[in-house]
Amino acid sequence: MGLSKICLILAAAPYLYSANDLEEVKLHSLYLMQQNQIEESIEKYREFSDLTGRHDFEVLQQMGLILLQKGIQSDDPQTFLMTLFGAGLSGSTGALEIIEKGLHHSDPQVQLLALHFIAKFDDDKTNDLLNGAMSSDYLAIRMEAAFYMAQRKHPHAVGQIEGLMFRLPPMFKPFFPSLFALLGTSDATAALRRLIEDPDPQVRVESILNVARLGRDDFLSLLRKRLTHTHVAELEATAFAMGALKDSSSMAKLRKLIRSPTDTVRLAAIMALFHLGDRTFVPQVEEMAKNNNLFAIASLGAISETENTLAQLILSNDIQVRMNAAIALLERRDPRCLSALSEILILDGRDLAFQPFSSVGRTLSAWKAIPAAELRSKDPSLDLSYSLAMREHLLRESIHLPEKQFLHLGRLIFNRQQNDLVPGLISLLENLQTEGAIALLKEGAEKISSPLIRDYCHLALYRLKQEGPYEEYINHWVLNQKEAELIRLRPLLPWKYRLEQSDYALSPEETSRLLIEAFLSIANRRDEKSIAFLLEAIQMGNPKNRYALMGLLMKATE
């Protein structure tokens, strides 16, 4: 039989089958999935797709829900986690019952992941599930549920949060003002007013800070009275609040605080006056910075016309001074920060970690560099997740430097193989989309000795739809990762560092993170080719990954 005749028969295939025949093939694929014959089910669906010449999104959604319902019943912890992740990624309201099972898991980390995904659903049942999570055996789960209830302004939030606060020892009370401030309802406001008058100064300080940071100027009359109190932390916090809430009527009292014997109160008052338009006392901040006061150095990042002072400090032999000056100079978007900024971003034999520290009133903050981080990794006071988050943040901020300096920094990260920063750098280069950024991505795609950089650059160029072999490269790479573990989770940061975080963060573990980003990129194309590729990956790839991939497929076909 000639080739042209075969092609003619294949083209006519849909017409050789009746509607009933096609319906039977479709139903058979669903039956096979229900029987847990996953590869056979996908093969049968692909047969249906070939016959009709199109994808049936409704069938794919049904197949996905069946697979996820099977996976969540597994006793294998990895399969359970992958299924939970897939259900969360799918965005399907039908998956909410699957995610709910994560709340009853014995591992609190799994419960946290389930809570994260539940909170993303805008559904009446979400409120019920968050309410139920407040009865968890784990305090961390109850606190996390309280955070999500406050974010969503849950109708029962105030009662649940107050109930939890009163059941816990007094040492936990300072965690609660942020939740009431976030809620902002009349009941929450009444609770917050009571906390500002609490006997515990730490509770009062946290209440004042949260009122200020959320712009709650309805508390101004209450706060003004506290400018005459003697407690150092409370004075510092109240001074900060007057500046944040733009209360010009407090300027006279703030000027009196500049005579305070406590540096942090004095500095908070000066910064409040600066935010109210009074630059009179800025030279005092510069003088404190020249005397190596790290809080003063950090504060200069918010003050214009202090760049030359910071440029001098960046030459200091003291790494703490040099580092904080670089961060402040970066905030001023001054390229003179580059040399010291590179010292933070490019790790070397000193094995530096970076930790934040705050003033007693928690309105002023700075960073300290800690050498030999690996040797101190078992020290409970050293949290390396802060260090990575800080370096990633500085890299994102460096996009505001002149392009030449930013690309120099990017090339340095590539050449020194700072793999933990590569995903973030690639994302920035993609967003920049200039000729220089694309040229650097193409340069990275040629790095034979740096597979992670090479693979990420190919992925970026594929997403940017650049001409070249990038799509074929990514498809080939993904299919070769059959044994790779798809998901590893990064530890959650505290609430105040997560209010702008939209997704549950993945760890920077190399293959895992690259693989999930590759699959997300393919799914986001939402075309026939990408759907077919995801089906092949589910059918032929790592069996444990298929549950998360099915969630991506459901997202792509919603």
Image (spheres, rainbow, N blue to C red):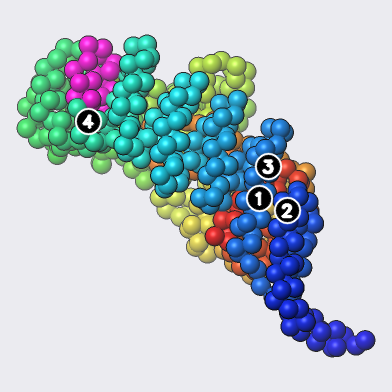
Q: Which mark is residue 33?
A: 2
| Disc 1 + disc 2, Cβ < 8 Å | yes
The mark nearer the N terminus, 4 or 3, is 3
Q: Residues within 10 Å of mark 4 (few under 14, many from 20)?
A: few
Name which residue lies at 12% across and 25% down: 222
Q: Does residue 435 appear in the picture of this structure?
A: yes
Label 1 to label 2: alpha-carbon separation: 7 Å
Closer mark to the observer between disc 2 and disc 3: 2
- CA gap between label 2 and label 3 equals 12 Å
Instruction: Return the disc, 4 or 1, that comes first in the chain's sequence.
Output: 1
Q: Are marks 4 and 3 in contact (CB under 8 Å)?
A: no
How far, Cα to Cα, is label 4 from label 2? 50 Å
- Tag 2: amino acid: Met
Residue 286 position, x and y percent, is 26, 29
Q: Which residue is mark 4?
A: 187
Q: Quadrant of residue 528?
A: bottom right
Separation (CA) of disc 3 from disc 1:
9 Å
Tell me where the magenta segment starts and ends, as one range. Answer: 191-210
Name the element at disc 2.
helix
The quadrant of the rendering that contains the N terminus is bottom right
- Which residue carries the number 3 mark? 71
Of the two numbered discs 2 and 3 on the same chain, state the one appearing first in sequence: 2
Q: Secondary structure at mark 3?
A: helix
Q: How many marks?
A: 4
Question: In this orientation, which residue lies closer to the viewer: 425 or 439?
Answer: 425
Above or below: residue 258 compared with residue 36? above
